[in-house]
Image: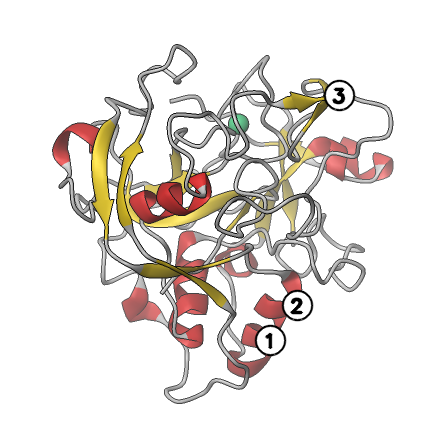
Amino acid sequence: MGRCCAPSVTGSEPKPAGEGAAGMLAVPAGVRTTAPPTLLRLPGGTFTMGTDGADAVPGDGEGPARRVTVSPFAIAAATVTNREFGDFVRATRYVTDAERQGASFVFYLQLPVHARRSARSAVAGLPWWVSVEHACWQRPEGPGSHVHDRPDHPVVHVSWHDAQAYCAWSGTRLPTEAQWEYAARGGVEGTRFPWGDELLANGEPRCNVWRGGFPNAPAEGWTPGPVAVRTGAANGYGLFNVCGNVWEWCADWYAADYHATTASTDPLGTAPNGRRAMRGGSFLCHDSYCNRYRLSARSANTPDSTASNVGFRVAA
Ligand SMILES: [Cu+2]
């Protein structure tokens, strides 16, 4: 699988489910100071998940498309924001993986010009990803940056473990891939996007994906980076930004044979193989390089990896 959108921490050991994950939470029992996020209640049902379309990314396991049934569940309208994650950190003093690791991956054009030269390119073959010391959720572009000016943007630089910790604190959990795709489709089946098959409307993408030439020539007037989580129109179920903006961690272990091996009712990838599933694509996705901003597209990363284009949405 191409790693264009998902740089990995190198040398990290996969952690088995249940140990490195929920078991490691440094969240004092009973500490929760804010109400859980407002969730959309969805009835569940049977839908066509995945695609056999020509634009599926070979090797990702987007198909074979199949009928999948999901039980009723609830899911957030938007990804977790900096403000929401800040409430969690203030209540629990939780320290994220990126803070412990001392660095995180930032797309180079998100950095101020003077910082680009000193940042080291850290991913072989993907020179646009740089490892920035002390970049983390509170300092998305490293020292000197902060989230005070973007409380409603998606929290980024959060690992799968960090997402799990937030979920445990807020009484939620990550959606499964099946729940994610069911919710993201918003009642529409067989299309690339929740609004249909066409990315563009009046020549502009209908979601926050790369505009211009990837990776060095963004379109005039578009800044590479996330936008506020409720930007644009909601889908048929009331979810915002399911395509583009930031990747969203899911509960599953990722496997390319997911559609061939998991149950048809409430499927879940359970084989601990080192990488957790992510859905939705990010602001870095572009047809010329990676079209994983489609509803059926899949990606994955090691559960301690963090980057400036990965966040999460909660479910219950
Ligand atoms: Cu992509």
Q: Earlier in the sequence, mark 2 or mark 3?
A: 2
Ligand 1 within 8 Å of the CB at mark 1: no
Q: Is the residue marked by circle 3 packed among few (<14), some (14-19), or many (20+) residues within 10 Å?
A: few
What residue did someone put label 2 on?
A: 83
Relative to 173, does residue 9 appear above or below in the rendering? above
Ligand 1 within 8 Å of the CB at mark 2: no
Residue 106 on image: x %, y %: 64, 40
What residue did someone put label 1 on?
A: 87
Q: Amino acid at mark 3?
A: Asn
Instruction: Please tell me which residue is depicted at 61% across the width and 44% down the height of the picture.
Output: 308
Pointer 2 and pointer 1: residues touching (CB < 8 Å)? Answer: yes
* Image disc number at residue 202: 3
Between 46 and 313, the one lying in front of the other is: 46
Pointer 1 and pointer 3: residues touching (CB < 8 Å)? Answer: no
Quadrant, the N terminus: top left
Residue 152 on image: x %, y %: 70, 59
Instruction: Please tell me which residue is depicted at 48% across the width and 84% down the height of the picture.
Output: 32
Secondary element type, mark 1:
helix
Secondary element type, mark 2:
helix
- Quick check: can you spot residue 302? no
* Residue 28 placement, left or right of 145: left
Q: Quadrant of residue 107?
A: top right
Between 65 and 162, the one lying in front of the other is: 65
Pointer 2 and pointer 3: residues touching (CB < 8 Å)? Answer: no
Nearer mark to the viewer, of 2 and 3: 3
